[in-house]
Amino acid sequence: MKNRCQWTKNNPINIEYHDNEWGVPVHDDRKLFEFLLLDAFQAGLSWLTILKKRNNFRQAFDAFDYKKIAEYNDQKIIELYNNTGIIRNKLKINAAVSNAKAFIKIQKEFGSFDKYIWSFVNYKTIKHSFKLLNEIPAVSKESDLMSKDLKKRGFKFVGSTICYAFMQAAGMVNDHELSCFRYNEV
């Protein structure tokens, strides 16, 4: 049996995500937007809840196409409010649309969202050396700076904790536990 990070709790959905995605550096703008959107919806909920609904989110939000999401009209937003397959939080749904617009502005300014967002970690993964789950922080100075700058640019649901979770998902930090088989792989 492979040794994994404690947070997977032997749950098959967590294991699939952990073994194949979590902590792998992402440089594709659409995938980065997907993680931003999902992390915003996760606020106050468990990541497992989001993973269970991920395919529903993908369908509801046009495969995370931020250009389409930025153009959502009132009818589409009402449709999302009524979609039982996703988290039906009006503030988070509205944030997804306004965040898509802000995302596009950053792309225009920096050439890509990837170039902008990875600047917070000096364009390379921060590799931590944590032995236990309780050693892993919820925020960092980088996530604090990222949160502040994203908010300044009009993003919502991008507090430092959400930004740190995003950094973990997108491989900007490697928070696999030292004993985890993925620690040296990512």
Image (cartoon, rainbow, N blue to C red):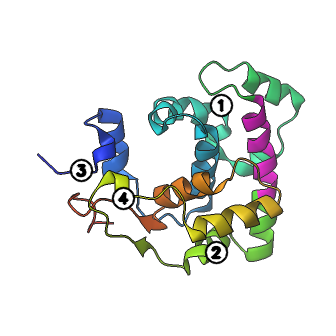
Q: Residue furthest left?
A: 1
Q: Earlier in the sequence, mark 4 or mark 1?
A: 1
Pointer 3: what residue?
4
Q: Earlier in the sequence, mark 2 or mark 1?
A: 1
Q: Which mark is residue 115?
A: 2
* Image coordinates for residue 2, horizontal then vertical, percent: 15, 50
Which residue lies at the image location 63% right of the left edge and 69% below the top edge? Answer: 117
Q: Earlier in the sequence, mark 1 or mark 3?
A: 3
Mark 1: which secondary structure? helix
The amino acid sitting under disc 1 is Ala
Q: Is residue 93 magenta?
A: yes
Which residue lies at the image location 88% right of the left edge and 30% below the top edge? Answer: 74
Q: Do the residues bearing badges 4 and 1 touch, measured as CB atoms within 8 Å? A: no
Mark 4: which secondary structure? helix
Circle 3: is it few (<14), some (14-19), or many (20+) Cα within 10 Å? many
Q: Which residues are magenta?
A: 90-102
Task: Determine which quarter of the picture holds residue 84.
Answer: top right
